[in-house]
Image: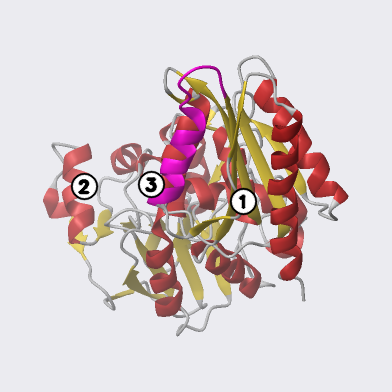
């Protein structure tokens, strides 16, 4: 039993929806699931572009058999070797032992690292601009190194003008019925697309820009990524989103306040700042307890808004552990173009505020907009005024950017 999911006449979406896996890469929660998109071109020569994650390999093979109906599979293109796309490759090779595997020179090295007895005679090495003739369809390849692995590449169908972009332009969230942007409600996906970008590709903004510039010369009628929505009506929308995120350009005015608290004092301070931001005319305010909300959702909102205010209790002369995780990832990703406020709480030697200041010093693209506030135990009236001053300074800076 199969549903029909054609992209064009001979090109089919044969992806799978994963609503079982709890965490992507075993650490990022998947409340809306994830789709592993794969494509089959049923031409004179048959070709699959990327496979799926191992857990859905059975369904994947069923889908292929349902379309090929005994016809042989000639090629499998491996745009990216990460297991969410290569997990079903071994199974596929067992079902279709004559299929040639296509990738670049780095892909081959990775395949051999994953599958030690891989038969190299099955591999066809392609480089930038090489073409593959399937009969009606002609494909070509472009390298997009570090979007987000060194072997990452895209496949372009010259005939139907389809860009098989792999992880570029991807998203979390399963494809619940609709597969194309004009068949579904983008509002269901926008946050998950940003969370996917910020947490998976986020470190590689410059490489994403290089890839977008390189691919900008192609006439593209379809963008078919390896996760989430397929684009055909509003291609510029997804390109614009990825381009903004790659440049750390905030989407709208707003502030993320994230705090780490053990007994509630730092949380109290966060609420004072939030209330004062509101008094000063800011509407988009998201307050997060770093111990409760998974960091990937907080990071997604940090990508969305220009204002960021971080608070931490002191913990063993350092920042509170969940805040440490967040700071570490943001520093690793090179967060920039954000206004930053800092606050926290201590009793004897501190560590929370000190740690956030160190983080700010390491990232020149962050602008600390007010004097950090560190209360000793319960915040005093003076502390409260200083917290309000952070909020006022933040609101002023944000409002000054309105046009
Ligand atoms: Fe990947
Ligand atoms: Fe992926």
Report the label total. Answer: 3
Q: Which of marks 1 and 3 is in front?
A: 1
Residue displayed at 71% across by 31% down: 269
Quarter-wise, where is residue 266 in the image?
A: top right
Q: Is residue 342 left or right of residue 327?
A: right
Q: Nearer the viewer, mark 3 or mark 2?
A: 3
Q: Which of marks 2 and 1 is in front?
A: 1
Alpha-carbon span between mark 2 and mark 1: 48 Å
Quarter-wise, where is residue 306 in the image?
A: bottom right
Highlighted magenta segment, given as a residue range: 346-362
Residue displayed at 46% across by 83% down: 218
* Element on which disc 2 rests: helix
Q: In this view, does 280 lie to the left or right of 98?
A: right
For mark 2, what is the residue? 110
Q: Residues within 10 Å of mark 3 (few under 14, many from 20)?
A: few
* Element on which disc 3 rests: helix
Disc 2 residue: CB within 8 Å of ligand 1: no
Determine which of the numbered discs, if any, sits on residue 332 in the image: 3
In reply to whether residue 357 is colored magenta, the answer given is yes
Q: Position of residue 233 (x, y in %)?
A: 69, 72
For mark 1, what is the residue? 370
- Sequence order check: which comes first, mark 2 or mark 1? 2
* Element on which disc 1 rests: loop
Q: Position of residue 305 (x, y in %)?
A: 66, 55
Instruction: Look at the picture and state if 221 lies above or below 34.
Output: below
Disc 1 residue: CB within 8 Å of ligand 1: no
Instruction: Look at the picture and state if 400 lies above or below 150.
Output: below
Residue displayed at 69% across by 41% down: 386
- Sequence order check: which comes first, mark 1 or mark 3? 3
Residue displayed at 59% across by 31% down: 344
Q: Nearer the viewer, residue 377 or 87?
A: 377
Q: In this view, does 361 lie to the left or right of 311?
A: left
């Amino acid at each position: 039993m199969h549903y029909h999911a054609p992209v064009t006449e001979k090109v089919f979406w044969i992806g799978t929806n994963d609503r079982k896996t709890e965490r992507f890469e075993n650490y990022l929660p998947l409340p809306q699931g994830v789709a592993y998109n794969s494509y089959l071109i049923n031409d004179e020569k048959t070709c699959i572009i990327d496979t799926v994650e191992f857990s859905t390999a059975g369904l994947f093979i069923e889908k292929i058999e349902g379309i090929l109906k005994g016809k042989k599979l000639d090629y499998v293109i491996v745009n990216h070797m990460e297991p969410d796309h290569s997990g079903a490759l071994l199974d596929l090779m067992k079902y279709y032992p004559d299929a040639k595997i296509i990738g670049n020179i780095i892909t081959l090295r990775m395949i051999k690292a994953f599958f030690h007895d891989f038969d190299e005679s099955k591999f066809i090495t392609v480089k930038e601009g090489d073409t593959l003739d399937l009969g009606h369809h002609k494909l070509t390849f472009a390298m997009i190194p570090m979007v987000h692995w060194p072997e990452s590449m895209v496949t372009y169908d010259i005939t139907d003008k389809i860009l098989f972009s792999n992880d570029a332009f991807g998203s979390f969230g399963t494809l619940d019925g609709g597969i194309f942007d004009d068949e579904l409600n983008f509002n269901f996906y926008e946050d998950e697309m940003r969370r996917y970008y910020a947490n998976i590709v986020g470190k590689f903004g410059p490489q994403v820009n290089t890839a977008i510039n390189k691919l900008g010369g192609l006439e593209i009628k379809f963008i078919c990524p390896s996760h989430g929505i397929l684009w055909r009506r509003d291609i510029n929308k997804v390109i614009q989103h990825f381009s903004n995120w790659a440049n750390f350009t905030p989407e709208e005015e707003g502030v993320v306040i994230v705090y780490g608290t053990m007994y509630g004092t730092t949380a109290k301070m966060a609420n004072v700042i939030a209330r004062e931001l509101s008094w000063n005319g800011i509407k988009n305010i998201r307050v997060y307890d770093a111990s409760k909300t998974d960091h990937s959702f907080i990071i997604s909102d940090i990508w969305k808004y220009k204002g960021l205010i971080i608070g931490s209790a002191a913990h063993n002369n350092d920042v509170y552990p969940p805040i440490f995780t967040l700071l570490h990832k943001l520093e690793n990703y090179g967060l920039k173009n954000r206004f930053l406020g800092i606050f926290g709480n201590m009793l004897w030697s501190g560590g929370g505020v000190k740690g956030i200041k160190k983080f700010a010093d390491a990232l020149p693209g962050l602008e600390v907009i007010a004097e950090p506030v560190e209360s000793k135990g319960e915040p005093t009236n003076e502390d409260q005024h200083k917290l309000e001053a952070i909020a006022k300074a933040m609101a002023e800076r944000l409002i000054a950017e309105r046009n």
